Image (tube, coloured by chain):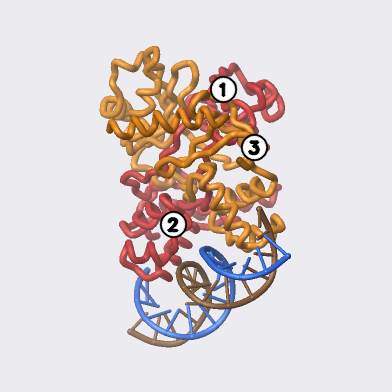
Chain colours: A orange, B red, C blue, D brown
Amino acid sequence: MRGLDDTDRGIVRLLLEDARRPFSDIAEEVGLSAPAVSDRVDRLQEMGIVRGFTLDLDRSLLRAGVPVLVEIDAEPGRAAAVRDGLADADAVEHVFRTADGRVTVTATVPQAEVSDLLDAHVDLNDVDSYEVRLVADSEWTPGLGTAEFAPECAECGNTVDEEGERTVLDGDSYYFCCGSCESRFVDHYESLKEGA
Amino acid sequence: MRGLDDTDRGIVRLLLEDARRPFSDIAEEVGLSAPAVSDRVDRLQEMGIVRGFTLDLDRSLLRAGVPVLVEIDAEPGRAAAVRDGLADADAVEHVFRTADGRVTVTATVPQAEVSDLLDAHVDLNDVDSYEVRLVADSEWTPGLGTAEFAPECAECGNTVDEEGERTVLDGDSYYFCCGSCESRFVDHYESLKEGA
DNA sequence: GGTGAAAATTCTGTGGG
DNA sequence: CCCACAGAATTTTCACC
């Protein structure tokens, strides 16, 4: 399995700045030909690193309400459930689940009617307490830093290195630290799928 | 000043799903010609609603460290300064400033070395206290909801309606509820610029 | 604002190293 | 894995409504 090299990182960095930049431009910047860039972008998508191309919107100009930041302390073990409920909500933009069982959400709600949002998308028994803050402004820096490609094994959780494997199931990429983990995961996956 | 109509919202929605989708595709979906879509996208960019085209990355595959969420309580009146310092940092992805003087930041740092990050980018006299949480997972929902176009007047803060004005200064769009606010703002802006 | 057709660019295969 | 080339597709420009 191939990892990321500096050329890949350069391509990602340029596309983060402008995802509609012509491949020929990018090719010149990174010292490749346009078709080679196209190939690499395809590979980055297959690998699952590039999930897609999208817009950077200024949502402060698009308010159908008030932007809020909500900090929810979930009941033990229920943080993932809270996150799942909120992630589907239309008004929600970001959901961060932290290791201490807290879920931090940003959303734009009609008039700070956060309780309605929680009512509709979360089982209130999962919530210990929550706090609402009005967002004054927010910024998003689509940077890459010195990113390394280091996925976790979908079966055992270990870091996957160059020796690892990648398998595509139903269009999603999964990474494995070894062939054994891979075949075990695929077996589980297939039996689950048959059951459904 | 023109607002957003359903066609604009349709275009934005389609581009959110795939920012590299051909304009001719979009044109067919929304019932326009390709040049008309191109014109509208240009206008959306001029209006500042579309800040740009970018990538949706799966950063969980790209860890250059540990993803953290930091909650910083700034000293009175210093929240904006804290935000500005952090927004420039390479490791920082999101910065949310809330009305209660708190700055919430997500970043990916080498090994939870958050103090170094703050040291390098923030005047510690501006910080009252801060708390660090490890991010277990995060999600981003590039949805649009039932967005209305309703910017705030850059001079007086009132909501700008169809009667309002838009002015472009140094490449950024500014909105005003009336001509009086506009000329006052432009005067301020120009004298500030001369001073600098 | 919008359209339609022509011109300029860009993307995507294919063959070859 | 990469390049060069060529055909297909797309974006942009322009005249006109």
Residue A42, given in percent of the width and then of the height, sits at 54, 52
User: Foreground: B3 or A75?
Assistant: A75
Q: Are marks 3 and 2 in contact (CB under 8 Å)?
A: no
Question: Where, by quadrant of the figure, is residue B40 drawn?
Answer: bottom left
Residues beneath discs 1 and 3 located on the same chain:
no
Taking the spot 69% from the left edge, 57% from the top edge, the residue there is: A29
Indicate whether B149 appears above or below A79.
below
The secondary element bearing badge 2 is classed as strand
Q: Amino acid at mark 1?
A: Ile
Please name the residue that numbered disc 1 is placed on: B72
Please name the residue that numbered disc 3 is placed on: A147
Q: Tell me which label, 1 or 2, sits earlier in the chain.
A: 1
**Closer to viewer: mark 1 or mark 2:** 1
Neighbourhood count class around disc 1 (C-alpha, 10 Å): few under 14, some 14–19, many 20 upward: many
State which chain disc 1 sits on. B
Please name the residue that numbered disc 2 is placed on: B165
Taking the spot 43% from the left edge, 23% from the top edge, the residue there is: A103
Q: Give me the C-alpha separation between circle 1 and circle 2.
A: 37 Å
Residue A195, given in percent of the width and then of the height, sits at 28, 31
